[in-house]
Image (cartoon, rainbow, N blue to C red):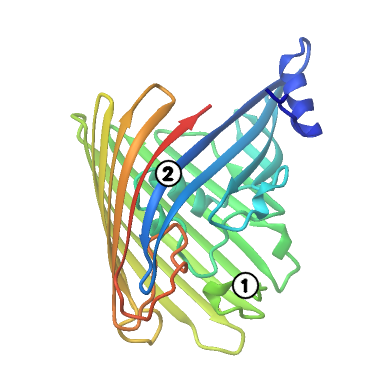
Amino acid sequence: MKPLLLSAPLALALLLAASPGQAEVQLDGSFDGALSVNDLGDQTQARADYDVTIGIGGSDQLDGGGQVIWRLEQGITNYTDNATAVFGGKEAWIGYTGETGTLRLGKMKSPLYDLLDARYADTGAKFLLAEYAPGQNVYPGSAIRYDSPEFSGLTVFALYDLDQGDGSHYSYDLGMQFAKAGFFVDGAFQQRKGIDGSDDDAVGNASEFDGQTWFIAGGYDFGNGLGVNVGYKSMAHTPQGGAEIEQELWFAQGSYASGKHSAYLTYMQLGDQGDLDESGAQAMAARYAYGLSKQTIAYVEGRYVWNDENASYGPTDDAYDYVGAPGEDTSRLIAGLKTEF
């Protein structure tokens, strides 16, 4: 059996985690592997997909109170580009947390994306609710983010992307989350100006664009395993010298959990993109999961997208992963295992 080879940074992190007298260091992550069959219009493909996240984080209790915190996170998949596979490619930040809240500096999730990803990641609906929004800021690479303490169920978030902060170019997020007695409301607003979109298919590879994205969602957990939530997401971007292109997304989701069983059913309606008639879609996503242990689930998931006459949205985690002609329906069936550590 060949020995396991570790990169120098990972080996160092594991050494620190095991060494007495050092600040606290933890290794965590998840491995999601599945078989999928994807109808992409003119092509049906079968794939063995994997999506791996490995995070290393730590904290140090300060003499004067509060903690210094930090995190490095990387992800590897075989169905998108692996720019995040480098050490710290997803998140790389350091910060302070205490009674006044948490302040972080570096690369991290934007609050708008973070709120949607946290709630819908394992429901089958993330591909439209969280991942889709032309020009959306997902992992700003040089940001400052503040999370307030929770007060009577309310937490607020703010982020400024320093990569875009030269006066005429900027990007920021404002968000909030409220939860009490089974009821929740999530919402966030993201404003961007003068952003380089030359490598962004979603905005037509515009050399420069302005963007505005916001969402509001709310729901209720009935306490007997049943839950419902509804939401609205507004997306708009304006290429330099062009007209604003707006699009909206409505969604509703029902959920049920009992013991080792959980299930989700989501309906999504995507409106026309700008002035292009019949360029929206409707979609359904259904997911069932069974807990094999406290850390591992087995799941089966189906998605179906009804494209309008001038729409071309795919059913995978990248809605632009599509090879058919406009107006064709697309679908996905996937079964897999996910374990967290």
Relative placement, left or right, of 23 versus 222 is right
Which is more toward the observer, 23 or 294? 294
Question: Picture coordinates of residue 79 (x, y %)?
Answer: 53, 55
Q: Is residue 272 visible?
A: yes
Residue topped by disc 2: 34
In-image side of 329 versus 65 (left or right): left
Of residues 78 and 17, which is closer to you in this image? 78
Q: State the mark number for residue 67.
A: none
Eye-nearest disc, 1 or 2: 2
Whether residue 62 is visible: no
Residue at (54, 47) in percent of width and height: 157
How far is the residue under mark 1 from the one under mark 2?
39 Å
Q: Residue at x 49, y 83 (%)?
A: 244
Crowd class of label 2 (few under 14; some 14 to 19; many from 20; radius 10 Å): some
Query: SS of the residue at dot 1?
Result: strand
Disc 2 marks which amino acid?
Ala
Q: Tell me the tag on residue 193.
A: 1
User: Residue type at mark 1?
Assistant: Lys
Residue 330, quarter of the rendered image? bottom left
User: Vertical placement of 9 versus 178: above or below?
Assistant: above
Q: Earlier in the sequence, mark 1 or mark 2?
A: 2
Q: Residues within 10 Å of mark 1 (few under 14, many from 20)?
A: many
Q: Which residue occupies the foreground of this view, 338 or 107?
A: 338
Return the residue found at the far top. 20
Q: Horizontal and vertical percent for residue 94?
A: 72, 38
Q: Is residue 27 left or right of residue 214?
A: right
Q: Quadrant of the N terminus?
A: top right
Residue 99 in percent (x, y) is at 60, 28
